[in-house]
Amino acid sequence: MAQLIDGKRISQEIKDELKVKVAELKAQGKTGALAVIQVGEDPASSVYVRNKKNACAYIGIESLSYELPKETTQQELLDLIEKLNADSHVRGILVQLPVPAHIDENAIIRAIRPDKDVDGFHPQSVGAMTIGQKGFLPCTPAGIIQLLKRSGIEIAGKHCVVIGRSNIVGKPMALLLLHENGTVTIAHSKTRNLKELCKEADILVVAMGKPRFIGADYVKEGAVVIDVGIHRNENNKLCGDVKFEEVEPLASAITPVPGGVGPMTIAMLMNNCVESIAENEG
Ligand code: GUN
C-alpha cells in the first residue's frame, strides 16, 4: 500500500504556520493586502477566486476583490493593475487566468510589478527562478516540492519525469526539481516511448491534462506519483490524470485527487503573499 500524500493536511499545516507569521508581522506594523482580479464569470475561476479570498481571511490578510465584467477592455484592466502597482498597501496582485480572448494574457502578466507578482508568472520572476535568484515561485510546482519534502521524500539523485511543459506547471516543476538535485526529464505530447520513459521514473509528476491517462503500465514499482490533473468524470466526480486505484498498489507514495496537489497551490500563494508583506519597506 502506498503512502497517501495528504495535500489537505499539509496545506492546512502551512496555512497555520502562516497565520502565526501574519500575526507577528502585524505586531511589527507590517500589513498588506492581496488584490484578486477576475474578468468575466467562468464558474471554475469563481471557485478558485473564492477559495483564495477565504484563505486570505483564514491567515489574517486583507483581500481586495475586483470582479470585472467580461467586456472589460485590456486598457481598463491595465489601468487597474497600474493603480494597484502604485498602491503601497497592496502587496500582491493576482489576475485569475484565463482572461477573455480579447485580452492579451502576456501583456497582463508583464504589467504586474514583479515585487507584487505573487503568482510567479512575470518573465522577471521566471528568469530569477531559472537562475536560482530571489523572486516569487509559481505556486503549484512550489507546492509539489513542499508535498515531497514534508512527506519525507528525498529528491536528490532521483530520476524525476515530468509529463507536461506548460509555463504554469511543467516547465517550472522541472526547474524546481533540478534545484533540489533531481535528475529531470520533461516529457510531452510528442515524446516517443512515453510509457517506457515513465517506467524509469523514481518520481513521476503528471501534468498532462488528460483524465485518467496514466495506468499501472506507466509506473515502476515503488515510484512516487504526483497527479496534477483535475477533471470531472461522466458522473461529475473529480478525477486526475492518473488511474488512482490501479497505480496506488504499485507506488510507494501517491497524491489523491481531490486533496493532493490542489490545496497546495493556494497554500503557496498565501506563502508568497506573506513573504511580500514581510519584505515591504513601505
Ligand atoms: N488559473 C489556473 N491556475 C491559476 C493560478 O495559479 N493563478 C492564476 N492567476 N490563474 C490561474
Image (cartoon, grey):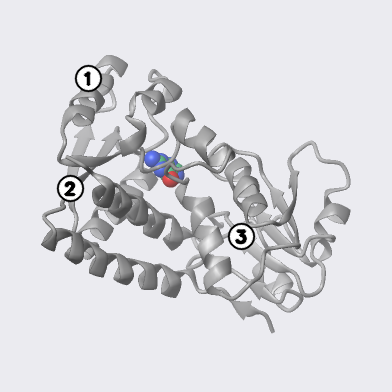
Nearest to the eye among marks 1 and 2: give it: 2
Q: Is residue 253 left or right of residue 234?
A: right
Nearest to the eye among marks 3 and 2: give it: 2
Q: Circle 1 is placed at which residue position?
A: 79
Q: Is residue 77 left or right of residue 215?
A: left
Horizontal and vertical percent for residue 95?
33, 35
Residue count near mark 1 (Cα–Cα under 10 Å), binned few <14, some 14–19, many ≥20: few
Q: In the image shown, does 209 or 161 lie closer to the viewer?
A: 161
Give the alpha-carbon distance from disc 1 to disc 2, as whole Å. 21 Å
In the image, residue 220 above or below residue 241:
below
Say how many tags the image has: 3
Residue with the most extreme bottom position:
1
Q: Is residue 75 left or right of residue 228?
A: left
Horizontal and vertical percent for residue 30?
16, 53
Give the quadrant of ligand 1. top left
Give the alpha-carbon distance from disc 1 to disc 3, as whole Å. 38 Å
Residue count near mark 2 (Cα–Cα under 10 Å), binned few <14, some 14–19, many ≥20: many
Q: Residue at x 43, y 41 (%)?
A: 135
Query: Which residue type does callout 3 highlight?
Result: Asp
Q: In the image shown, does 98 or 22 lie closer to the viewer?
A: 22
Q: Earlier in the sequence, mark 1 or mark 2?
A: 2
Horizontal and vertical percent for residue 273?
30, 50
Q: Circle 3 is placed at which residue position?
A: 227
Q: Secondary structure at mark 2?
A: loop
Q: Secondary structure at mark 1?
A: helix
Q: Is residue 203 left or right of residue 79?
A: right
Query: Which residue type does callout 2 highlight?
Result: Gly
Q: Residue at x 27, y 15 (%)?
A: 75
Q: Circle 2 is placed at which residue position?
A: 32
Horizontal and vertical percent for residue 39?
29, 32
